[in-house]
Image: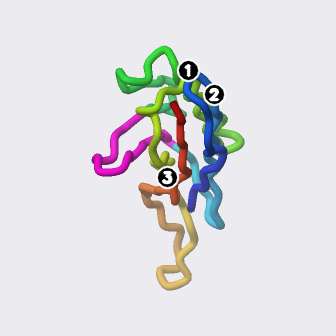
């Protein structure tokens, strides 16, 4: 299973961007939760927003509450982050993370194998100019 982000770019302060993240894989899988993290230059990676695909619950970092909205479609294995009223301090590489239940057939064991995976994307750069 892997995830791929898209939608990053350059935007002026006060503008909007929408990030997307899509999960795919050759084995059967279902998504428990997906998150957006970000990492600005010289700073540690921080959690921006989380969506629980089982219950639909969402959580946000205080710094983005009221400006960012996370949404997702489990059937499409896709998550979005709508970012409005962007500030220069939102400039960072944004990473998609997924908590996934996966199942595949092992020819060695001759049985189905279930596993829980933590999957990270390569990141997409968001630059907000002031």
Q: Look at the image and say whether residue 36 sits in the magenta stretch.
A: yes
Marks 2 & 3, CB-CB < 8 Å contact:
no
Label 2: few (<14), some (14–19) or many (≥20) C-alpha neighbours in 10 Å = some
Residue 109 % position (x, y): 47, 80
For the residues bearing labels 1 and 2, Cβ distance under 8 angstroms: yes
The residue under label 3 is: 101
User: In the rendered structure, does residue 45 fall within the stretch colored magenta?
Assistant: yes
Q: Which residue is mark 2?
A: 16
Q: CA distance from mark 3 to mark 1?
A: 35 Å
Query: In the image, what residue occupies the spot 46% across and 39% down?
Result: 91
Q: Can residue 9 be seen at all in this image of the molecule?
A: yes
Give 96 or 2, whichever is nearer the viewer.
96
Q: Which residue is mark 1?
A: 85
Q: Earlier in the sequence, mark 2 or mark 3?
A: 2
**Which of the two discs, 3 and 1, labels the residue nearer the N terminus?**
1
Q: Please provide the residue range marked out in magenta.
A: 32-48
Res. 112 mark: none
Q: Give the image location of residue 72, x and y in percent.
A: 62, 33
What predominant SS class does the magenta segment belong to?
strand
Which residue is painted at 61% across and 28% down in the image? 82
SS for callout 2:
loop
Q: Gap between marks 2 and 3, in whole Å?
A: 33 Å
Query: Image point 62% across, 45% down: which residue?
Result: 9
Crowding around mark 1 (Cα neighbors within 10 Å: few <14, some 14 to 19, many 20+) is: some
Asked if residue 121 lies left or right of residue 26, the reply is left
Q: Quadrant of residue 75?
A: top right
């Amino acid at each position: 299973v892997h995830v791929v982000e898209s939608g990053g770019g350059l935007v002026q302060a006060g503008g909007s961007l929408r990030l997307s993240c899509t999960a795919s894989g050759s084995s059967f899988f279902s998504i428990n939760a997906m998150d957006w993290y970000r990492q600005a230059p010289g700073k540690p990676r921080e959690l921006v927003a989380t969506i629980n695909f089982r219950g639909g619950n969402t959580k946000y970092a205080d710094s983005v509450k009221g400006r960012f909205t996370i949404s997702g479609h489990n059937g499409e294995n896709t998550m979005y982050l709508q970012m409005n009223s962007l500030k220069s301090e939102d400039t960072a590489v944004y990473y998609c993370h997924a908590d996934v239940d996966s199942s595949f057939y092992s020819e060695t064991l001759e049985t189905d194998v279930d596993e829980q995976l933590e999957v990270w994307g390569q990141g997409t750069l968001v630059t907000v100019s002031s």
